Image (tube, rainbow, N blue to C red):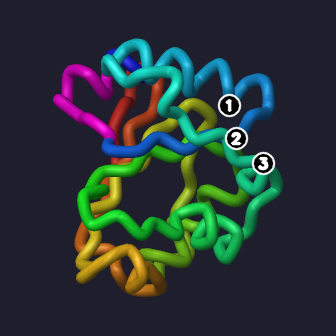
Amino acid sequence: MGRTLVSAADHFDRLISSPALRARQTALCVAEAIGFSEECIDWDDGLYLADPQDLLDCLDISSASVHHVGVVGHNPGLSQFGSYLSQQNDVFLSTCGVARFELKIDGWETLGPGCVRRFKFQHPGPAGESG
């Protein structure tokens, strides 16, 4: 999936990850694949067993220069967060999946329900993409 991110020309201004073993391994692989400095990864214990409010708290970003954020975390929290932001009940992010949300917000402080302009999921394996 790191190669998928690179081929899609993604970059992150900020990368936030749970420090749990598999999330940490994933974040390090993604960071290496996209040329993001490992020292710049924000390790956040709040991502483990996070609900939508916890994820909002993790994304409390005050810098106006941060436009693209990557989050490596856990389900069911990430799927619930996708449902919360998009106001759609059927959001499900598979293991090792990538969700991209294009947001219609004036700043990170306005992140909340209904702020998703469009979203796309990419899943490992032959089916690959949905959303």
Question: Is the Cβ of the residue at disc 2 closer than 8 Å to that at disc 1?
Answer: yes
Amino acid on which the number 1 mark rests in the picture: Ala
Residue nearer the viewer, 120 or 7: 7
Question: Is the Cβ of the residue at disc 3 closer than 8 Å to that at disc 1?
Answer: no
Amino acid on which the number 3 mark rests in the picture: Asp
Secondary structure, mark 3, is helix
Residue nearer the viewer, 120 or 112: 112
Rendering quarter of residue 56:
bottom right
Residue 106 image offset from top left, x and y in percent: 24, 82
Amino acid on which the number 2 mark rests in the picture: Ser
Of pointers 2 and 3, the one earlier in the residue sequence: 2
Residue identifier under label 1:
23
Q: Is residue 48 above or below residue 3?
A: below
Of pointers 3 and 1, the one earlier in the residue sequence: 1
Residue shown at 30% from the left, 56% from the top: 66
Residue 47 image offset from top left, x and y in percent: 72, 52
Horizontally, residue 84 falls left or right of residue 65, namely: right
Q: Is residue 103 above or below residue 26?
A: below
Residue identifier under label 3:
45
Q: Is residue 131 visible?
A: no
Q: Is residue 31 above or below residue 56?
A: above
Mark 2 to mark 1 CA distance (whole Å): 6 Å
Q: Which mark is residue 18?
A: 2
Q: Is residue 101 visible?
A: yes
Indicate yes or no whether the magenta region holds residue 6. yes
